Image (cartoon, rainbow, N blue to C red):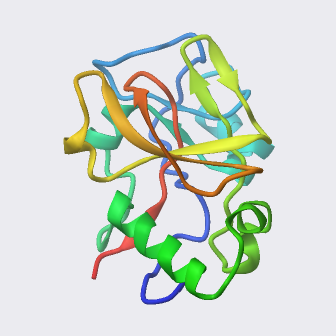
Amino acid sequence: EIGDQCWFAENCRYLPEVSLASENSTAEPRAYVMNFNGQDLDSARYQMAFRAHGVLYNFKALVEWPVCPTGYHVASSSDWGELESYVSSIDVPSAIYAQEANYSGLGISFAGKKGFNGFEDEGHMTKYWLGDWETGFPDNYPTIRFNHDSWFSSFVDLESYGLSIRCIKDQ
């Protein structure tokens, strides 16, 4: 628990299937494991990146798959905002928090993303899909980014990209 919120301590690892890095889709749900380019589930789950960073999902997977267990939901912009307010209230600089994320137990890992041309930015940043995706524009949906220099940065990303998901307990 962080403040009044109960977050997953790591990125989602729900993996009903794994896609090749070359498989971009806006019509079908896709899941990727950083730097893994196979389709065998057992092999994907054995990868160090799976254990360290979880799974990267395209937007369709966010909408169609039960990535969060019952009683949890994909963290929304207001969930992240409440977390940011709490962390600010205990006087932890955002850049330090981004680098030392385990300080509060949130465990942000710089998982990178799966872009149109393959895997990118592992060890440098991570992006999360937001649960309030209905606010997006056609083909672009809101996300939050963490990197070594900043904690919260809002972006929009293409629905074919593979990004991380973090779940939070329903209140």
Q: Position of residue 142 (x, y in %)?
A: 36, 40
Query: Is 125 positioned to the left or the right of 140 in the image?
Result: right
8 left or right of 170? right
Image position of 115 with respect to 56: above or below = above
Residue 83 visible, this orientation = yes
Q: Nearer the viewer, residue 157 or 14?
A: 157
Q: Residue at x 52, y 70 (%)?
A: 8
How many labels, in total? Answer: 0
Residue at x 34%, y 42% (from the top left corner): 62
3 vs 42: above or below: below
Viewer-side residue, 108 vs 36: 108
- The x and y percentages for residue 115 are 57, 21
Q: Residue at x 39, y 52 (%)?
A: 67
Q: Is residue 62 left or right of residue 121?
A: left
x, y percent for residue 3: 50, 88
Please identify the quarter of the rendering in which residue 126 is found: top right
Q: Is residue 76 visible?
A: no
Whole-percent x and y of residue 84?
52, 71
Q: Is residue 136 positioned above or below 107 on the image? A: above
Q: Quadrant of residue 32?
A: top right
Question: Which quarter of the image is occupied by the C terminus?
Answer: bottom left
Looking at the image, residue 48 sits to the left or right of residue 64; the answer is right
